[in-house]
Amino acid sequence: MGEFFTWSSLATYAGATLATTLFTELLKEAGAIKRIPTRLFSYIIAVVLLVLASLFTSGLTLETAALSFVNAVVVSLAANGTFDAVSTKRGPVNKDK
C-alpha cells in the first residue's frame, strides 16, 4: 500500500467511516465549526467525502449523489459510534473472570 487513502478506498464503508471519524475529531473544535452539533458536522463530512469519492471514481450522477446522502447517514452514525466506543471511560478490567 503506497498511500493512506485513495478515492476508491474512501468510497467503501470502512474507508468513509474512518475518514469521517478522523476529520470530525480533527475539525470539530475549529472556529465557527464548534457551534455546529458534532453529529450534524459528522454527517456533512460524510456527505462531502462520499460525493467526492463518487466524483473521482465512478463519476457523479444524480443517482450516486442521492445515494451519497443516504449512505452518509450510515457512515456518520458508525463514525459517531466508533468515537463514542473508543472515548468511553471504562473501569478497571477484572482479570479473575
Image: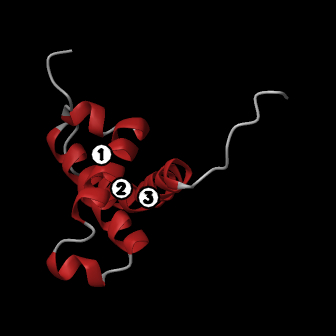
Choose between 68 and 20: the one closer to the eye.
20
Q: Residue at x 28, y 84 (%)?
A: 35
Q: Which residue is mark 2?
A: 68
Instruction: Give the answer, above or below, for where 22 lies relative to 7.
Output: below
| Mark closer to the chain start, 3 or 2 | 2
Instruction: Give the answer, above or below, for where 60 lies relative to 45.
Output: above
Q: CA distance from mark 3 to mark 1?
A: 10 Å
Instruction: Give the answer, above or below, for where 56 lies relative to 3.
Output: below
Q: Secondary structure at mark 3?
A: helix
Residue 1 position within the rendered picture, expressed as x and y whole percent measured from the top left: 21, 15
Q: Label 1 crowding class (10 Å Cα cut-off): few <14, some 14-19, many 20+?
A: some
| Mark closer to the chain start, 3 or 1 | 1
* Tag in front: 3 or 2: 3
> In this image, 14 relative to 81: left or right?
left
Q: CA distance from mark 2 to mark 1?
A: 15 Å
Do residues under tags 3 and 1 come within 8 Å of each other at their CB atoms?
no
Mark 2 is on which residue type?
Answer: Ser
> In this image, 93 relative to 84: left or right?
right
Q: Which residue is mark 1?
A: 19
Q: Residue at x 29, y 32 (%)?
A: 9
Q: Residue at x 42, y 40 (%)?
A: 13
Mark 3 is on which residue type?
Answer: Ser
> In this image, 55 relative to 75: left or right?
left
Q: Secondary structure at mark 2?
A: helix
- Dot label at residue 76: 3
Q: Residue at x 30, y 49 (%)?
A: 22
Q: Is residue 62 visible?
A: no
Choose between 32 and 78: the one closer to the eye.
32
Q: Toward which corner of the image does residue 29 lie, by quadrant?
A: bottom left
Mark 1 is on which residue type?
Answer: Ala
